[in-house]
Amino acid sequence: MATMKAAVVTEFKKPLQIQDVEIPKPKAHEVLVKMITSGVCHTDLHAAHGDWPVKPPLPIIPGHEGVGEVVEMGDEVTNLKLGDVVGVPWLHTACGHCEFCRTARETICHDQENSGYSVNGSFAEYAIMDAAYTITVPKELDPIYAAPLFCAGVTTYKALKVSGVKPGQWVSIVGIGGLGHVAIQYAKAMGMRVVAVTAPNDKLSSDLAHEMGADLVYSGPGEKMGEWIQNEIGGAHGAVITAVAKQPFNEALKSLKRGGRLVPVALPQGSMELPIFDTVLNATEVVGSIVGTRQDLYETLDIAAKAGIKPNVTVKKLDEINEIFDDMLAGQIKGRVVLQF
Ligand SMILES: [Zn+2]
Ligand SMILES: [Zn+2]
């Protein structure tokens, strides 16, 4: 049996194990992708810890920011060819025929599969993709910089679209990590003015926000964020929240202009407070946004190629995955870590 190296979750909240596992065979509608690189997302950490109500089946190989080459194809695949450089995004596949799939909202299909969560993902030398859900990488993009676009890029680009913020208007990007730093670049490419919000006194993230082109950066006390944004710019037209904590959700609501829209993206545990009086009087909108469709992903990559969007990456190896997770928990990562195979 031909084997590949993979990082495997065998038990929640325990270190991942580097194992030799069998190289999977693509079914008729699938392709086998030989991984070149994969980003490491906070969601992979949630998967490894079993943090969410729906837990992945174990053992599982995490990873949903893979970029690799198509090396084997099932008999029915017609939209790809051998040698194509493609991505392994969160949305591995969806049913294709429910109300949500029919209306180009496949990311909320009840019968979807997710890379690195319900099916094995990109923390391995090979991964399987459903050809119908596989998007090719524009040749202008280096795989190392393209990988984070398959989750961090598409998720924030989509959230910015959902925010409804128009060119010249203000969007706040709350949380400047793997997602937030890419969000700043997309917001600027889309003509928005950006106020970036980091964790209090977080110099690493504040420097990164400036480098990415934020117009304003707030690194003050969490409970003053709403008031500060109101005083500086009269409120934001939209807020995209990528911070993995509850408090920023409540503060971001207070930071909105009347008629503003809050777009939650990060997934901390618990609930946010939605004051009824203010929500009614200010006509506040709250709209969740989860990754992006195939079309969103196509646009994400196309804009990156044309506007020169480039995530801030640190290159590491697969067997460093447990140290990478430790750094992630300690807030020690500037931008994104990508694994090179
Ligand atoms: Zn992700
Ligand atoms: Zn569906």
Image: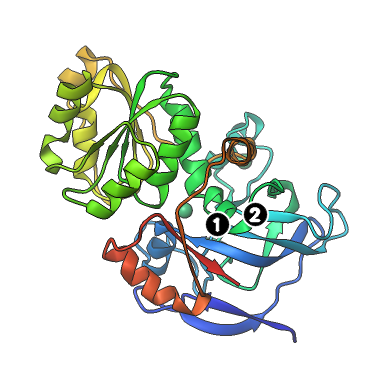
Quadrant of the rendering where the N terminus is positioned: bottom right
Mark 2 is on which residue type?
Gly
**Dot 1, crowdedness within 10 Å: few (<14), some or many (≥20)?**
many
x and y percent of residue 2 in the render? Answer: 74, 84
For the point 51% across and 75% down, the residue is 317
Q: In the drawing, what numbered circle is on residue 168?
A: none
Residue under numbered circle 2: 87
Q: Nearer the viewer, residue 32 or 177?
A: 177
**Dot 2, crowdedness within 10 Å: few (<14), some or many (≥20)?**
many
Mark 1 is on which residue type?
Glu
Residue 291 visible to the viewer: no
Q: Secondary structure at mark 2?
A: strand
Ligand 1 within 8 Å of the CB at mark 1: yes
The answer to whether the residue labelled 1 contacts the one labelled 2, judged by CB atoms less than 8 Å apart, is yes
x and y percent of residue 28 in the render? Answer: 82, 59
Residue 260 visible to the viewer: yes
Q: Secondary structure at mark 1?
A: loop
222 to 27, vertically: above or below: above
Q: For marks 1 and 2, give the CA distance.
A: 7 Å
Q: In the drawing, what numbered circle is on residue 65?
A: 1
For the point 11% across and 43% down, the residue is 221
Is 86 left, or right, of 79 in this rendering? left
Q: Nearer the viewer, residue 137 or 24?
A: 137
x and y percent of residue 198 in the render? Answer: 25, 45
Quadrant of the rendering where the C terminus is positioned: bottom right
The quadrant in which residue 160 appears is: top left
Sequence-wise first label, 1 or 2 = 1
